[in-house]
Image (spheres, rainbow, N blue to C red):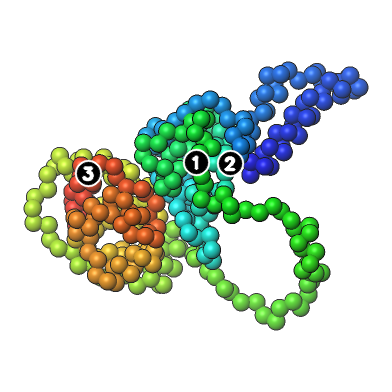
Amino acid sequence: MSKYLNVLAGTVAATLMAGPVLADKLGLGRPALPEEVAAWDLDVRPDGVGLPAGSGSVEVGEEVFADQCAVCHGDFAEGVDNWPKLAGGDGTLDHDDPLKTVGSFWPYLSTTWDYVNRSMPFGNAQSLSPDEVYAIVAYILYSNDLVDEDFVLSNENFLEVEMPNAGGFILDDRLVAEAHFSAEPCMSNCKPSVEITMRAAVLDVTPEETKAKAESVTVEPVAATPEPVVAALDPELVEAGEKAFKKCKSCHQVGEGAKNKSGPALNGIVNGAAGAAEGFRYSKPMKAAGADGLVWTEDELTGFLTKPKAYMKGTKMSFSGFKKDKDIAAVIAYLKSFPE
């Protein structure tokens, strides 16, 4: 993408610089001012050329991302509805349905920085300061488990970040390669019959209500075996858990009328069987864990909420985990208040 943006910027800049010639010849317009040319010269290249001075931490990036990006991309870069997912997809590029994100697919970090700086947030492009862009990119890296929570991205260490798929691209040689196997396209009687090979619900483009019905047909939930909560809940801890649960609300619902979203509804999750929300399409590891008898005790939930991807490899949950033990305890207490 950066390559095409570079070409566009170069074309525009060349046209502006040719202004004096056109102005003299046609008697139209005026030469572009240096600051006008500079306003178009925004591209950032894979070698770091074009990066402005600045820096931004993961911690600040989480706040800016929540304010500017989460409405479309989710609080944890997991994507909302069919808006793009920016995190996850590690090891899926060889799958039939790969998840292509910044962490799994994009070869250059400069593409991320350049796109955020040039085009985001949606509807208010180029309103972010360089430090805010650095912070957002740092948080996206963190959401993909590529940096630690105390990481600070800057123009000075930018090139030190290695993207997992940097070696996954080749030069476009279609003009040479396709000459060996290309043929005239078939225009009639090309196939004896047309068959449906995939339903829209599988492609994740069906509205939520319809998709839920389709998924309820294909997924057999594991029966939950909730245990009654004996100990009285600490109201202050539950209140703290409600605040901490804000990080979960973009994917999960609880309470009366809770429905599956991009994550399952969590009523009855504490001491309930794993993979048990009716109608939700769980990942294979989660379904297997439920079939093997995994029950979400407080200890198991603590392990999962600390670092989901380390606890269960292959989970679809893109949240990287709570940083503080007290937040985990509070969230579990809050979930306990919704036994069914």
Question: What residue do we see at 48% from left, 59% from top?
Answer: 91
Question: What residue do we see at 66% from left, 54% from top?
Answer: 170
> Where residue 164 appears, x then y in whole percent?
51, 50
Q: Which mark is residue 111?
A: 2
Name the residue carrying label 3: 325
Name the residue carrying label 1: 161
Counting other residues with Cα less than 10 Å from the Cα at mark 2, is it few (<14), some (14-19), or many (20 or more)? many
Q: Quote the CA–CA distance across marks 3 and 1.
A: 29 Å
Depicted 248 relative to depicted 151: above or below: below
Whether residue 99 is visible here, answered yes or no, is yes
Q: Secondary structure at mark 2?
A: helix
Sequence-earlier tag: 3 or 1: 1
Depicted 333 relative to depicted 21: above or below: below
Quarter of the image for residue 76 reads top left
Whether residue 120 is visible here, answered yes or no, is no
> Where residue 158 appears, x then y in whole percent?
52, 35
> Where residue 247 appears, x then y in whole percent?
33, 43
Kind of residue at badge 3: Asp
Q: Indicate which label's residue lies in the foreground, 3 or 1.
A: 1
The quadrant in which the C terminus is found is bottom left
Sequence-earlier tag: 2 or 1: 2
Q: Quote the CA–CA distance across marks 2 and 3.
A: 36 Å
